[in-house]
Amino acid sequence: MLSRRALLVLPALAARPAWALPPRTLEFPRDFGSHPALRTEWWYITGHAQAGRRDFGFQITFFRSRVDATQAMRSAFAARQLVFAHAAITDLEGRKLWHDQRIARAGFGVASAAEEDTDVRLRNWTLKREAQGYTARLPAEGFALDLRFTSTQPVLLQGQDGLSRKGPQAEQASYYYSEPQLATRGRLTLQGRGFDVEGAAWLDHEWSDAYMHPDAVGWDWIGMNLQDGGALMAFRMRRRDGSSLWHGGSLRGADGGVRVFGPDELRFEAEATWTSPRTRAVYPTRWRIQTPAGSFRVQALLDDQELDSRGSTGAVYWEGLSDLQDDGGRRIGRGYLEMTGYAQALRM
């Protein structure tokens, strides 16, 4: 995706054969930083915040992409690494999604992704980790985000100790951790009007050499902060006919215990759809997701949360604020639903 995951970029990115990622112990703060030897990486923050009774969702994403074809070039102008960024605000009262995008080659003080810790920059858009959390500043077209995220829980390693399979072959995998339940404070601005907000966010950081199986066209993913302090993540890789190729996910309970879901333990069922008037893509906006820990429903809070990133990562995807409900229809969490590969197949 890119979004996330949405990295559809240059054909040159596929020039080097992919190898299975070895199991390794993630080390922090080093692994908060970038990993330029691998092709694809993203830092992804999604969340919800309130200003009085007004509710907002937000997305902040920085992507790094290694361009294999330029690695041997001597010129300082060679685009060895590309940095992309997406920013979005969902205004529920205004029933509108605001979004913007940026792209630049790394270097020359324009764009960078530090290796020693999270410090990603693209012109005046920044995401940086500090002692207790993160700061993000993204002045965008028609809106702006200036937010602080405070860690309230330990890092959540996804998959098997941070190595997350994405397909039936071993090379389809990423190193992947999350930081759920980030306490959020700061300021959102829409068309010059500022809102002081508080809320909660979810951070995903993934890096990979080969993310998708050749038969996969996209994925469906949720990251949900539960009201009891827990965290639910679930995804499926999807074939062109809509069937599931691979599943994964985890549930961290309120007591801190983690259950990792196997590829055969999840089921995604679409219960309602929305058709984009711009791309004619049909997105499920209500899902039933069955897990070993229970059955859940995911309900989008605004149908039109489609983002067109063809000016940067090359993809159109749906990324939006959603509620998580139990089988009785009671809201038990809030977070983000992401759907890629519906407008066109992804190639990563």
Image: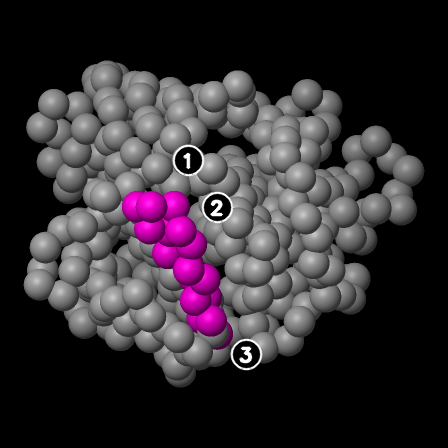
Q: Is residue 290 left or right of residue 286?
A: right
**Residue 324 rendering spot, x and y as whole percentages:** 21, 54
Residue at horizontal 64 percent and vertical 75 percent from the top: 169
In this rendered view, identify the residue nearer to me: 219 or 23. 23
Element at badge 3? loop
**Residue 93 rendering spot, x and y as whole percentages:** 11, 36
> What residue span does the magenta drawing correspond to?
246-262
Element at badge 2? strand
Confirm or deny contact between disc 3 and disc 1 (CB under 8 A).
no
In this rendered view, identify the residue nearer to me: 242 or 35. 35
Q: Is residue 247 magenta?
A: yes
Q: Earlier in the sequence, mark 3 or mark 2?
A: 2
Q: Residues within 10 Å of mark 2 (few under 14, many from 20)?
A: many
Give the spatial CA distance, label 3 vs label 2: 29 Å
Element at badge 1? loop
Q: Which residue is mark 3?
A: 215
Residue at horizontal 30 percent and vertical 65 percent from the top: 293
Mark number for residue 153?
A: 1
Residue at horizontal 53 percent and vertical 59 percent from the top: 159
Above or below for 160 versus 27: below
Confirm or deny contact between disc 1 and disc 2 (CB under 8 A).
yes
Give the spatial CA distance, label 3 vs label 1: 36 Å
Residue type for callout 1: Gln
**Residue 302 rendering spot, x and y as whole percentages:** 18, 49
State the image quarter where residue 10 is shown: bottom right
Residue type for callout 2: Leu
Mark number for residue 156?
A: 2
Mark number for residue 55?
A: none
Q: Is residue 167 left or right of residue 332?
A: right
Q: Residues within 10 Å of mark 3 (few under 14, many from 20)?
A: few
